[in-house]
Amino acid sequence: TAGPPPPSAAAAEFPAEARTKLNPDANAGSVPGSGTQMPPRRRRLVAGIDQDELLDPDALADPDSSFYEFNGVRVHHKVCAHGEDEDSGGQSSGSAVARSQVGLPIVLLHGFGASVFSWSRVMRPLARIAGAKVLAFDRPAFGLTSRTRRSGDDTKPLNPYSMAFSAMATLAFIDQLGAGKAVLVGHSAGCLVAVEAYFEAPERVAALVLVAPAIFAPRKGEKENSAGEQEGADKKESDDNNAAPNPFARIWGGFLGMCMWLAGLVLKLVMAVQDTVRALSTKVLVAFLRSSLAASLVRLIMDKFGVTGVRNAWYDPSKVTDHVIQGYTKPLRSKGWETALLEYTISMITDTSPKSRVPVSKRLSEISCPVLVVTGDTDRLVPASNAERLARAIPGATLEVIKNCGHLPQEERAEEFLSVVERFLQRAFGTPDEHVFQAAV
């Protein structure tokens, strides 16, 4: 009878234990005694990023990255100082650059889903234009700023994912720059942070540059309608006062007043019940958003639509390079990124700002510093028409529309963006001699 086949040369040279060390997946998933192989474990990918190999933000930082602790949060930021790494071209035009410098630092505020990366093409040129430092930081939940896990009670006085935190962090970075005031440049949702910081401390903000601003602008006629309603009410009250006294009318008026009082009381009771139901539903929603199922949904959405969203933000999606995609997906390699996005959503739902506080969209007329509004003519996310209304609502604001440009002028049309910002800063802060020079040119 024939004996068992001799071992192969490879098997003789490398014993089973050694082969397992060389190829750990060789017996992965095998069923003992059956000789069958189970398929290898499937990797969890989100936009091409392996979710089983996430890192701390510090490990993902670039050589020029810095971290600044504010209210217990390590905020990732980058600073470009005027004169850093000047090339020969910059040296040759030194006199023109010196003439255009305004001597004010600039703080850059990115939009939703972005990071300091979205300013990478314009930070250094802006530093040369301003003749001062330019700083960009990652708002909590985005970029490489540390992810803070919120507990169920949320007792901390300042939620790091709130708008108030971002506004206060902006002012703190102005302090860190050692400046009395700075120019705030916001993009998309970052414009709201810039405006909130202005209303918090208007004396610290030299000017506002609002790029593709995601701020609701009142439509024309809203103020006129409210004024007309008030005028009609005043006229009716005047007519009632001038009418001849009538005892039956007074009795009837008293009866109607009592009915209105009762109706108001019932309405208050209904509103109280609605507030209770709303509070309960909010608690249920918050509990869901802090569940593992919600985290899985966020990963699924980012995997299916994250890269597509970046491409659609450009006028010409075909020009979005791999470098841009990598810049936007890099934060997905940071531990806890999905939890931070959910906490950011919760902060918007549970905003505890006083109800008496007037919304930003109704305070635009109070802005008194120089304002530039920049928009792309084919912005698919925030229509250019909204930017136009916003510019009309802010006294003295300047509007610049960049042609063949989408939602990201500072990335897609960097040269045109820098040009309009430089013109604005020179008009706002240039000396009289510089204005004469510009007119002559």
Image (tube, rainbow, N blue to C red):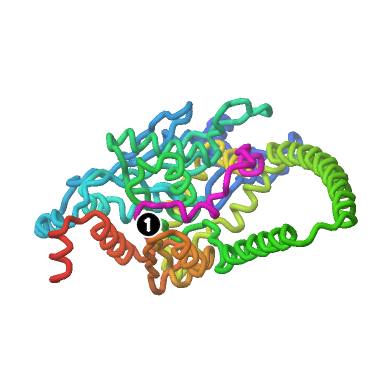
Residue bearing the label numbered 1:
371
Q: Residue 110: x and y, percent?
A: 44, 50
Foreground residue among 380 and 48: 380
Point 90% across, 56% down: residue: 248
Provide the residue span drawn in magenta. Answer: 346-372
**The N terminus sits in image quarter:** top right
Foreground residue among 312 and 169: 169
**The C terminus sits in image quarter:** bottom left
- Disc 1, SS: strand
211 left or right, relative to 238: left
Q: Is residue 270 visible?
A: yes
Q: Residue 390: x and y, percent?
A: 48, 62
Q: Residue furthest bottom?
A: 404
Q: Is residue 15 visible?
A: no
Q: Amino acid at mark 1?
A: Val
223 left or right, relative to 170: right
Point 40% across, 47% down: residue: 116
User: Looking at the rendering, which quadrant does residue 336 occupy?
Assistant: top right
Q: Residue 219: x and y, percent?
A: 56, 66
| Magenta stretch encompasses residue 67 | no
Q: Residue 20: x and y, percent?
A: 57, 34
